Image (tube, rainbow, N blue to C red):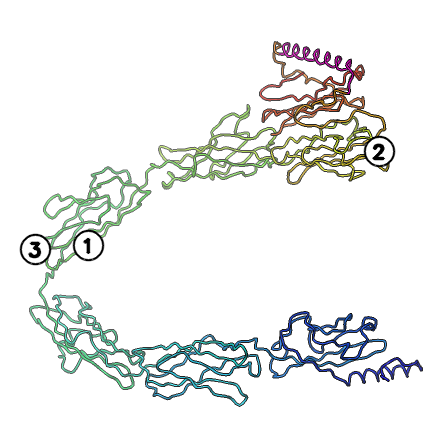
Amino acid sequence: MDPCKAVPPRGRYVSIFIVLFCAWHTASAVTHYTIPEEMKEGSVVANLAADLHLDVKTLSRRKMRLDIIANKKYLDVNKETGELFIVEKIDRELICTTKSSCYLKLEVTLENPLRIFNIELEILDMNDNAPQFRRDAIHLDISESASAGERFSLSNAIDPDVGNNSVKTYRLSESEHFNIEVQTGRDGSKFADIILKKALDREKQAVHNLILTAVDGGTPTRSGTVRVVVHVLDTNDNTPIFDENEYHIKVMENSPIGTLVIHLNATDLDEDLNSEIVYSYSLYTSEKTQDTFHLNPSTGELTVKGMLNYEDFRIYEMEIIATDKGLNALSGNCKIKILVEDMNDNHPEISIKSFQSTIKEDIEVGAVIAVVSVSDKDSGDNGVVDIGIPRNMPFKLKESSDNYFQLVVSEPLDREKVPEYEITFTVTDRGSPPLSDNETMTLELLDVNDNVPKFPQSFCTIRVMENNAPGALISSLTAYDPDLHENQYLVYFILEKEIANTSISMLFSINPENGNLYAMKTFDYEIEKEFLFHIEARDSGVPPLSSNVTVHIIIVDQNDNTPVIVSPWRAHGSVVEEKIPRSTDKGSLVSKVIAIDTDSVLNSRITYQFLQVTDATLFSLDQYNGEIRTMRMFSYRDQRHQRMVVVAKDNGEPALSATVTIKLSTVETAVKTHSDMTEVPLGYDIFSDLNLYLVIGLGSVSFLLLITILVTIVIKCQKPKTSKAAPPCRNSVLSERNSTIADSTLVSNDAYWYSLFLAETRKGKLVVRQPAPKGSRYIVSSLPRSTGLTETSDSAASTLQVRLDLNEEYYFL
């Protein structure tokens, strides 16, 4: 009998003893499994229920759980089947970083009664890691004097795998100078030595690039590579060599001290100290020569040290030695013969007799600025002197007499382009080689007021948000004048004009010093949309110059007007009462909400939505045209009174809205329903149901109505225009409920305009949308319905009028 199975209770202490005994008994047995690393998630390792002789049906009831000691949960147990399966891929190198063998210790715990099973899971290594070197490149320094057979150690590669999957051997790329030998350490690790098989020559090849490859013993094999860079160290085995063995050089007499005679260059194929050269005179060079010429020991430059005179000494000979700085110094030599040549040794001279250092920029072309003279103590061609000034200057030299020249203006001057000129007079004789001298004078140009102030652009558009604060800065209009001092000081002012009988200075002001433009009042987009005026910038020169810029102020609309609901009309407050037959078909038009917004464009675009509705499944609302339609037919379960709250919201930021409440009552008897509100008149398709008398009656009424309209139009065309002071016309709006509509007037100013015409027919209301000119104002008015109308007036039109306000106000009957 299993000692861990249920035991009859014999007191609290007996129970505790039995539990401890069962736990010790189960923990003493270890179940061992072996799996490879990197098994896929969901893979089954073993069936614990079968291996531990457990009843699968009791695993859930006994709260079977799996714990992994000192590791995260890589495995779990399926309580339905008792299978041990992989939850997360196991990486042996992550769990056991330094160990050759790797184990996971698991505990399986069951309750009622308590049993604990120890499970040991061995993780076998797979060749899933390639050998890697610690660095990207291995650098070796080997002297070119190293003999063949010398050995140099290389860094070994690391492979986190174990056994055969670790590094087994190394390979070296093909090289005529190097070979490789693989060594085995005490711990079995592999490392490589590089062996020199042929002597190196740094002068032929200073760097050798090799590829070292580490290969493991897994299946399939994996490898890693590293660059081996061998730097060949130099030895002093090359002698310095001059470019030529003998040099012949000509030097003019009177050459200045420090004049370069020759730059000697000796080369040494070695490097570092072995290639650094020191130059010196040999013992065969005379002291006279050494006193006349200086030899720089570091650079090899031979320069003049003393005065050279063709008449005193014509030929100098010397021997130069070049020695390197190697441990065993090597040297080379060359011979130099210097020939002194006769020369033109007197320089020409220039004398400034007269010069104006400052002139106005508007000086006339041909004006004399300076007078100069030239001379040379030599004779013949060596004493003939030519004088010149730099090219691309607005001046020229004009000879006035022997050796006298005048500097005159040859082109118009502009201080804004070139404020001053550095004029260099250069004199050169015609000797061989020619000698020259120069004299530089500075000419400064004085400013005159010859530049008009300029704005960056001739037309400036400025956008100003309506409802701005009075005195707010709206823009800065700055002009530029390239002149100087008072010619550059600008004053800004607005050119006076009247806009809508208002002086522009009452609307805007400008800072005369910096051109900052301010708004003097708060603008309302619905009243004034733009302004056009001019701003002038004037300098303080004599005479003053000025220019102006056209300023176009555009008032930008803000969403500061709330939408106004004009349909359906409300007698009291915002509640509208409607009636509809319960037999109304699906898709029938119940009502149409129309709202207007006096803002512009985006701020005036209205969308509609239900804020509240008694039954959301019964009615639908078109968010763009405000039409409320039935989504299905009424049923006996639907409430007799329906309440809908519709919100009309504009597209501004933040959005503004208005609401209307529609109370809809359903009746059993047929009442007039609203027809579909569209942009075209409705057609009648059920005349077949009317009797002949009704057809004749409707035809007569229609004919009389047509005659009345024509007569009214003719009378209106003959009447003079109504005065602006005349009151707007009022028209009755008929509701299907025969209720009295309270008088109301709505005024709007917007880019979207409508004339709304409502006509009551036997099918309901008809709405025709007509566009009105942009910029017009409209006034919507209504009067109480006459009580004298009867049901026979179903076809009579009741019109919701719109008054258009362009330059004058017009009223339509």
- Name the image quarter holding the N terminus: bottom right
Can you identify the residue that label 1 sits on? 438
* Residue 706 against residue 177 in the figure, above or below: above
* Residue 555 against residue 784 in the figure, above or below: below
Q: Is residue 714 magenta?
A: yes
* Residue 417 against residue 9 in the figure, above or below: above
What segment is highlighted magenta in the picture?
689-716
- Mark in front: 1 vs 2: 2
Q: Residue furthest right?
A: 10
Q: Is residue 264 left or right of residue 463?
A: left
Q: Secondary structure at mark 1?
A: strand
Q: Is residue 174 left or right of residue 12?
A: left
Residue type marked 2: His
- Asked whether 550 or 610 is in front, the reply is 610
Distance between the alpha carbons at the discs numbered 1 and 2: 111 Å
Can you identify the residue that label 2 sits on? 641
- Asked whether 600 or 706 is in front, the reply is 706
- Name the image quarter holding the C terminus: top right
Residue type marked 3: Asp
Rendered image: mark on residue 381: 3
From the top left corner, tell me how far across and down residue 302 is, in percent.
19, 72
Residue type marked 1: Asn
For image coordinates 79% across by 77% down, the residue present is: 109
